[in-house]
Amino acid sequence: MSDDISPPPHSSARMTLSERADALEEEMMHNLERIVSKSTFAHLTDGKVEMDGGFELLEANPGKYLLMGADPRLPPMPEKPTLVDYFRCRFASTSHLLQSATHALKAGHSEKVVLACLLHDIGIVSFIRCDHGYWGAQMIEPYVDEEVAWAIKMHQALRFFPDPSVGYEYPEMYRKLFGPDYTPEPYIVAEYKRARKHKWYMTSRLITLNDIYSFDPDAKVSLDDFVDIIGRNFKQPKEGLGLDNSPSAHMWRTILWPTRFL
């Protein structure tokens, strides 16, 4: 009998952290009734230029079909989801948004500004970090006042540029995150110059002013404090957010069913 007790080539002891995560994810998918696929974009975020093929997935999972509905691993959503439902069941983190909105509320700003602060980073918490201001603005544009969507779009550029007139300085946190020599891309600089001359400039600037760049982990905040403001300022579609026919409904459906094959 051999005394060699070293783990087999594909055992977890010889796998990298990334390989272990992939193996665990594959095992979880095999235990589901339907086959869960990843979008090409999801693979890109893992540094892989590839895509899941339907027939390959069927071959690897005999007797199963591809998932074309809700992912059972995610919290269930109601038949007609509202913005509040997305906050509770799909947004990965809401403390920063709630802190920013609370800051604006205590400062006595208008409900438009409070809503803009509440929604300014939903692109990050539900979709993607890159160009999150643009994504967030497009997501909400059919459902809010035009000024709110514009302000959210433009805050992406304004946050990199100080405005002494309102006491806004370049965030020290950005120096720690991006380095002292970071310079915004030319399109951000151009966007800032356009926004600076716009009639709604200050609405967007107030988002940056009420942004909580310290991200206080001990802050006591609640979405319940903003349900009435949402009700008065967010046009909830009767069919359910994402199930209506707005130009951005598909974005909400993607968040609703992120692993649906098609």
Image (cartoon, helix red, strand yellow):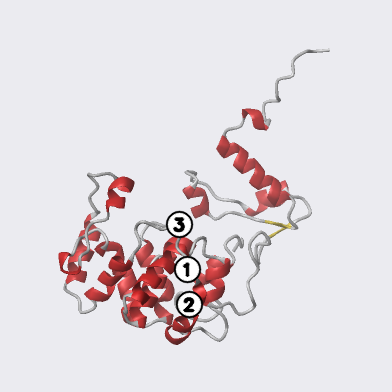
Where on the picture, by quarter, is residue 219?
bottom left
Residue appearing at x 23%, y 74% in the figure: 202
Mark 1 secondary-structure assignment: loop
* Label of residue 225 in the image: 2
- Neighbor class of circle 3 (other Cα within 10 Å; few <14, some 14-19, many 20+) is few
Q: Which mark is residue 26?
A: none
Which residue shows up at 59% across the image and 37% down it? Answer: 19
**In contact (CB < 8 Å): disc 1 and disc 3:** no
Residue placed most toward the observer, 31 or 174:
174
Disc nearer the start of the sequence (2/3): 3
How far apart in space, not on screen, are marks 2 and 1 (Cα)? 8 Å
Residue 15 in picture, x, y percent from top left:
61, 32
**Mark number displayed over residue 217:** 3
Relative to 75, 118 lies left or right: left
Look at the picture and state if 112 lies above or below 62: below
In the picture of the structure, the residue carrying the numbered disc 1 is: 221
Mark 3 residue element: loop
Identified by mark 3, the residue type is: Pro
Tag 2 near tag 1, CB within 8 Å:
yes
Residue 35: tell me if it is visible: yes
